[in-house]
Image: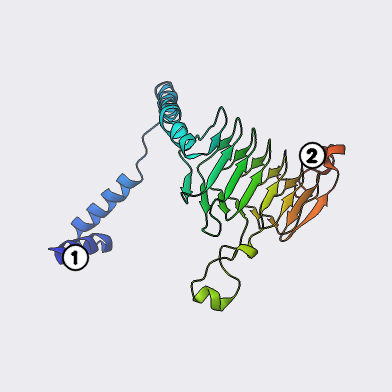
């Protein structure tokens, strides 16, 4: 039976007979069919769809996602928002401590077994973008009013030994190889950035998209590149966007 169906499908694809050719053209036409848009009809339906979708999102967030994730946290301040669903948390021993008005998009938060009680702290009014991965072995601290873009990775260890032999043997990270990460207040991290172990990012600094931070970042600076370097300094004293635009790694 399976061979018969496969043979019929091949006959239609190859258009070997007039009937197969007709079926092929009919199927192709159906695939490319597009219903004409009648704006007076479809525009209200569009807003109805959006309203139903957003209403469902609000119900899920208010009565399911937020309460469940709040229960998972050691400390969670007021107005916690998880608008895309509950973040995926790996490691029951991880302590999550959140300030007020924190927003965490759909993301992954994981903990290794190097230390008994690794800690993730996120300050007031900070946002973690969609698809971001935070890997905690000991401690990662994110300050107040931080903006972390989508698809970033923040980690306080290498997750695996540097030694090829130790990796082959399946050994884990040693405590002495873990270095906490500290992100200051009012820091903006663009999308697809990597913040690696032992790094401290100073207050008010900006990390340009796709940058890799391997060393400490000074306050009030813009860093860009792989590995990242300061491209603009003292941004608190400049109208940076007006003066520099996007030419110096500013993630506009």
Q: In this view of the protein, which residue sits in the foreground, 174 or 209?
A: 174
**What residue is drawn where x is 58% and y is 42%?**
129
Residue 72 as seen in the image, left or right of residue 119: left
Whole-percent x and y of residue 23? 23, 52
**What residue is drawn where x is 61% and y is 42%?**
121
Residue 160 as seen in the image, left or right of residue 179: left
**What residue is drawn where x is 20% and y is 64%?**
6
Residue 73 in the image: above or below residue 17: above
Element under disc 2: helix
Element under disc 1: helix
**Residue 191 visible within the image:** no
Q: Which mark is residue 7?
A: 1
Q: Quadrant for the N terminus, please.
A: bottom left
Query: Callout 1: 10 Å neighbours few (<14), some, many (20+)?
Result: few
Q: CA distance from mark 2 to mark 1?
A: 63 Å
In primary-sequence order, the first of circles 2 and 1 is 1
Q: Quadrant for the C terminus, please.
A: top right
Whole-percent x and y of residue 79? 56, 27
Q: In this view of the protein, which residue sits in the foreground, 120 or 201?
A: 120
Residue 130 in the image: above or below residue 8: above
Q: Nearer the viewer, mark 2 or mark 1?
A: 2
Whole-percent x and y of residue 62? 45, 27
Q: Quadrant of residue 245?
A: top right
Residue 162 as seen in the image, left or right of residue 15: right
Q: In this view of the protein, which residue sits in the foreground, 7 or 178?
A: 178
Q: Quadrant of residue 17?
A: bottom left
Q: Which mark is residue 241?
A: 2
Whole-percent x and y of residue 185? 72, 39
Q: Residue furthest bottom?
A: 165
Residue 56 in the image: above or below residue 123: above
Q: In this view of the protein, which residue sits in the foreground, 163 or 11?
A: 163
Q: Kindly indicate whether the residue at mark 1 contacts the one at mark 2 (C-beta within 8 angstroms).
A: no
């Amino acid at each position: 039976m399976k061979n018969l169906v496969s043979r019929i499908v091949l006959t239609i694809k190859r258009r070997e007979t007039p009937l197969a050719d007709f079926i092929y053209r009919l199927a192709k036409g159906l695939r490319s069919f597009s219903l004409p848009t009648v704006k007076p009809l479809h525009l209200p339906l569009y807003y109805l769809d959006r309203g139903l979708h957003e209403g469902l999102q609000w119900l899920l967030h208010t009565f399911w996602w937020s309460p469940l994730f709040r229960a998972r946290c050691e400390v969670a301040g007021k107005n916690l928002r998880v608008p895309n669903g509950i973040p995926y948390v790996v490691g029951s021993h991880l302590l999550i401590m959140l300030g007020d008005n924190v927003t965490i998009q759909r993301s992954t938060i994981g903990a290794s077994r190097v230390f008994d009680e690794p800690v993730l702290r996120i300050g007031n009014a900070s946002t973690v973008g969609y698809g971001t991965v935070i890997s905690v072995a000991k401690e990662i601290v994110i300050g107040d009013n931080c903006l972390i873009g989508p698809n970033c990775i923040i980690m306080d260890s290498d997750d695996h030994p540097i030694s090829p032999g130790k990796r082959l043997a399946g050994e884990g990270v040693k405590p002495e190889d873990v270095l906490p990460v500290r992100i200051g207040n009012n820091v903006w991290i663009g999308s697809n950035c990597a913040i690696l172990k032992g790094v401290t990012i100073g207050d008010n600094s900006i990390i340009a998209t796709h940058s890799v931070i391997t060393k400490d970042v000074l306050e009030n600076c813009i860093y860009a590149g792989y590995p990242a370097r300061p491209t603009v300094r003292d941004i608190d004293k400049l109208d940076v966007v007006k003066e520099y635009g996007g030419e110096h790694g500013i993630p506009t």
